[in-house]
Image (tube, rainbow, N blue to C red):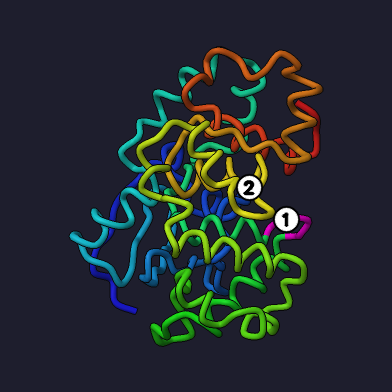
Amino acid sequence: MNEKKFYVLHKNALNISLSFDCGQAFRWEKTDDGTLHGVAFGRALTVKEDGDTAVFYDTDEKEFNEIWRPYLDLDRDYEALYAEFAADKYLRQAVEAYPGIRILRQEPWETLCSFIISQNNNIPRIKGIISRMCEALGDDLGNGDFTFPGPDRVLEAGADGLAPLRAGFRVKYILDAAEKVAGGEVDFGLIEKSDIETGAQELKKIKGVGDKVAACALLYGFGKADALPVDTWVKKILAETYPDGLPECTWGVRGIAQQYLFHFRRNAGTDL
């Protein structure tokens, strides 16, 4: 592992560990020495945090700016968001407890598949299915790393090729997604340039994709910061704390706000 580039980042602006392990991505693992390792956009990356410094290994400035800067949403001013969120006492509490969570801008196809797999599932099992899928169908990058297979490769594998993944009922949804994305029935280009409602309707052409999976794909895969995934935890938050919807200070970035509220509600051991 060669260190080619490092960036100094304030913890309040970016916490790598929290961002990679708050339920939005499933291909990052923490190693014995505390580094984080994963694959995104066909590139392997290792990151080590040391105080306020994040060291990015095996990348260079060009790749960092083209892939990892947008992936980590580094061009968004989260400190300004925190100032806006402080108008709401519950959001302020969540941000103070877990500063530095950023919404990852992931590859759309991988994100869509990952959240199809996530349905009625737990994180260790989701990671296991995705890992087996990449190892079976992805390109070998060496050192135990594999790319995420594209829709054409998934279609080629078919139900028999996906059986070893042990994904259960989700296999038929994965195959339907692959067929409709590869064939252009679900148009990622249209989703990219459309509003959230149009994007959701496009994604819901796929069997097994409802409001929650569509919102996750829009937020984490297409960068739609106002997309609002509503799972069991977020339902509780809305019912108990925001029966009239999230506050005005979150408008336009409700997806970012829900990530803080979700992580706090799930991990802090206390209600908002």
Residue corresponding to mark 2 = 213
* Quarter of the rendering containing residue 240: top right
In the image, is 3 to the left or to the right of 139? left
Residue 84 location, x and y as percent?
47, 17
Return the residue at label 1: 119
Dot 1 surroundings within 10 Å: few (below 14), some, or many (20 or more)?
A: some
Determine if the magenta segment contains residue 119: yes
Q: CA distance from mark 1 to mark 2?
A: 8 Å
- Tell me the quadrant of the picture where the N terminus can be found: bottom left
Q: Residues within 10 Å of mark 2 (few under 14, many from 20)?
A: many
- Range drawn in magenta: 118-122
Judge by depth and name the residue closer to the eye, 13 or 156.
Answer: 156
114 vs 196: above or below: below
Secondary structure beneath label 2: helix
Question: What is the x, y in percent for residue 143?
Answer: 43, 86
Question: What label does residue 128 carry, if any?
Answer: none
